[in-house]
Every structure is written in structure tokens, then in C-alpha cells.
Image (cartoon, rainbow, N blue to C red):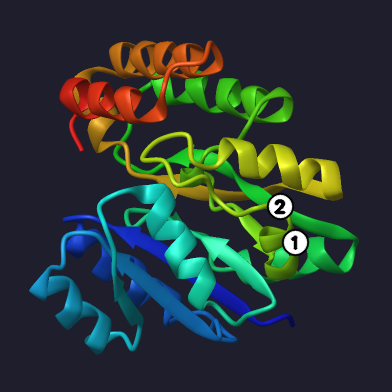
Amino acid sequence: MPRFSIIIPCYRDEEKLACLLAQLQQFSPMPCEMIVVDAADSARCAEICVQFQAHRIVSEPCRGQQLRVGAAQATGDILWFLHADAQLSMDALTAMANAIQHGAIGGYFRFRFAKPCAWPAWILEPMIALRCRFGVPYGDQGIFIKRLVYHQAGGHAPWPLFEEVPLVHAVRRLGKFLPLSEPIFVDSRRWQRDGWWRRTWHNRMLALRFMCGAAPQKLAARYHSKNGA
């Protein structure tokens, strides 16, 4: 089993972080290290990291920069990037190890909405899988990459949004970047709050503007003003 370093950017999502770290502690074997990059410099985040024996780093509130800072401190063979509100399948480490043993240099998990969710989830999930095949999987899909390949590819862009796009493009040029059949469960609270189709449409419009050359910093401001953090 390769050594996994788990890197989790966090910004005022402490209770979800606690749930994720508790789940990771149930894994066998345990990841070699869990690195939380706290952009809010939160006392509660610090307490949670001590409780679950995670290494905490304080960084500026920019997700791409948080991920870069965490990756620079990681020592494992494989870097696994998770959002604080992710929910995992218990065989996730085995699935990643098998992919690496069969020649992959990285990959990502199948997007599933965590319960409770509504009927649009059954339409959106296969649409997201199709988008990932021909486009880029985003950070909420548990992207994992060999550490040396990550640095060779240039790491995440230091942007607050779409920070994984240039990284995934670069990694795909270097070797096999595989979709796993195992799911990662994404918190559906924002879709429920904003409306499933409204949020999906707005996110697609942001992606289109990014593809047309809009600055990630401006898009991030629009993302948070429309959809919330």
C-alpha cells in the first residue's frame, strides 16, 4: 500500500471537517498524514485538528493557494485532495492503490450527491460523469496524484476557483489519469438551498466564462455572491 497524504482546505466549515477526519481515522491502514490548511485561522479548527491528530497550517483564503501550501508540506507517495464536506467510501484507499498499481499516475472518484437529495440528483450525476470524461473533474471529486507527478505538473493554480483545471490538463499529458467507479459523496446543501437547476446553470455559466478567458478571481467573487460560500 502506498503512503497517502491527505490535504484538506478548510474555511469556516469546521463541523464538516470534524466528520471527515473522524471517518478518515476509521480507515485501515490509516493515511500517513492528514494536513488541514485553515484559511480562517479558526480556534475551533485548531481544536479539531488536535483531536484527530491532523497537521494544521494557516494560509490565506484562496483555495488554490491552500492546496499548494498543503502539498508542499506533504511527504506521502500519493497526494489526495479532499474538500472538508466530503463523505467517503470505506474502500477509497484500496481503490486508489489499485489504480496506481495498474499504471495510473492519478485519478478521481465518481461524483454522487450525499443524502438527503432530490430527484434532479439522478439526472445530474450521470451528466457530471460525462463532463468529467471529456472535460475536467473538479476538486470535490477527491482528486489524487502521485506526489512527484503533482510537482512535475506544476501543482494547483494559485486561484480561488478552477484551480484544478491546469493541473488536470498537465497530469493527463504525463500519463493515465483514471476515473474510479467508487463514489465520493458531495454535500447537497447548496443545491437544496439555491435550487438544483438554478445552481447547476450558474456553475456552468461560470465554467463557460472561465473557458472564454475570464479571470478566476472575478469569477470567484461572483460565485460566492450568488451561491454563498
Q: Secondary structure at mark 1?
A: helix
- Disc 1 crowd, CA 10 A, few/some/many (<14, 14-19, 20+): some
Q: Is residue 147 above or below residue 34?
A: above
Badge number at residue 224: none
What's the residue at 37%, 49% (across, down)? 63
Q: Quadrant of the C terminus?
A: top left
Q: Is residue 109 toward the left or the right of residue 170 in the image?
A: left
What's the residue at 59%, 86% (across, down)? 29
Picture coordinates of residue 127 (x, y %)? 58, 20
Picture coordinates of residue 108 (x, y %)? 64, 49
Task: Please tell me in which quadrant of the rendered image residue 51 appears.
Answer: bottom left
Which residue is denoted by mark 1 in the rendering?
149
Which residue is denoted by mark 2 in the rendering?
153
Q: Quadrant of the N terminus?
A: bottom right
Q: Secondary structure at mark 2?
A: loop
Q: Amino acid at mark 1?
A: Val
Between 121 and 136, which is closer to the camera in this rendering?
A: 136
Picture coordinates of residue 135 (x, y %)? 67, 25
- Disc 2 crowd, CA 10 A, few/some/many (<14, 14-19, 20+): some
The reply to whether the C-beta atoms of the residues labelled 1 and 2 are less than 8 Å apart is yes
Task: Please tell me in which quadrant of the rendered image residue 221 appears.
Answer: top left
Q: Is residue 26 toward the left or the right of residue 197 in the image?
A: right
- What number of labels is visible? 2
Q: Amino acid at mark 2?
A: Ala
What's the residue at 18%, 31% (across, down)? 228
Q: Is residue 206 toward the left or the right of residue 105 in the image?
A: left
Picture coordinates of residue 30 (x, y %)? 54, 85
Q: CA distance from mark 1 to mark 2?
A: 6 Å
What's the residue at 39%, 19% (across, down)? 203
Task: Please tell me in which quadrant of the rendered image residue 60 appears.
Answer: bottom left
